[in-house]
Image (cartoon, rainbow, N blue to C red):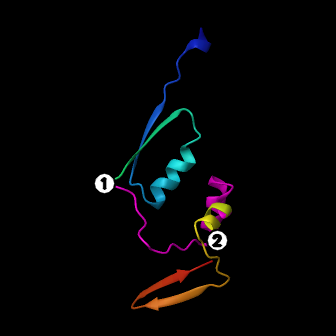
Amino acid sequence: MAGNTPVRRLRIAITGGGLAGATLANALFDQSHLDIHIFESAPEFSERGAAVSLAVNAQRALAEITPTANEILYKAGAVPMNSTRVVIVRTFIVFLLS
C-alpha cells in the first residue's frame, strides 16, 4: 500500500514576478512535488527598459539553473561586455562587470 500513498505537494508562494521571482520560479519549476504560485502586484507584465548587468559569478549561477542561459540571453538581445568598469558616484562605488 505504500505505493498508493498520495504525494503531498509543498506549496510555494513567490512574491514578485520580477527578475528574482521569475528566476526562482524557473529554477523550481521541474520539481514535481512543488506547487508554485507567483504573486505580483502589477496588473500585467511589461518591459521596463532598464539594463541589467550580470557579473561573472551571476552568469555561472544562471547557467547552473538554466543550462541554455547564454542562448536565451542572446535571443533576448543581451550584449556581452569584455571589460570591467568602476563608476564612482558621490560616496557609492558601482561595479559594472562582464
Distance in Å between CA atoms under marks 2 and 1: 31 Å
Which residue corresponds to mark 1?
A: 41
Quadrant placement of the N terminus: top right
Q: Position of residue 74 (x, y in %)?
A: 64, 67
Q: Amino acid at mark 2?
A: Val
Q: Is residue 79 left or right of residue 87?
A: right
The magenta-colored residue range is 44-70
Element on which disc 2 rests? helix
Name the residue located 35 percent from the left edge and 52 percent from the top edge.
40
Q: Position of residue 68 (x, y in %)?
A: 68, 57
Which residue corresponds to mark 2?
A: 56
Image-quadrant location for residue 29? top right
Say whether residue 48 is magenta: yes
Density class for disc 2 (Cα within 10 Å; few <14, some 14-19, many ≥20) is: few
Name the residue located 68 percent from the left edge and 82 percent from the top edge.
82
Mark toward the viewer: 2 or 1: 1
Q: Earlier in the sequence, mark 2 or mark 1?
A: 1
Say whether residue 90 is magenta: no
Q: Position of residue 60 (x, y in %)?
A: 66, 63
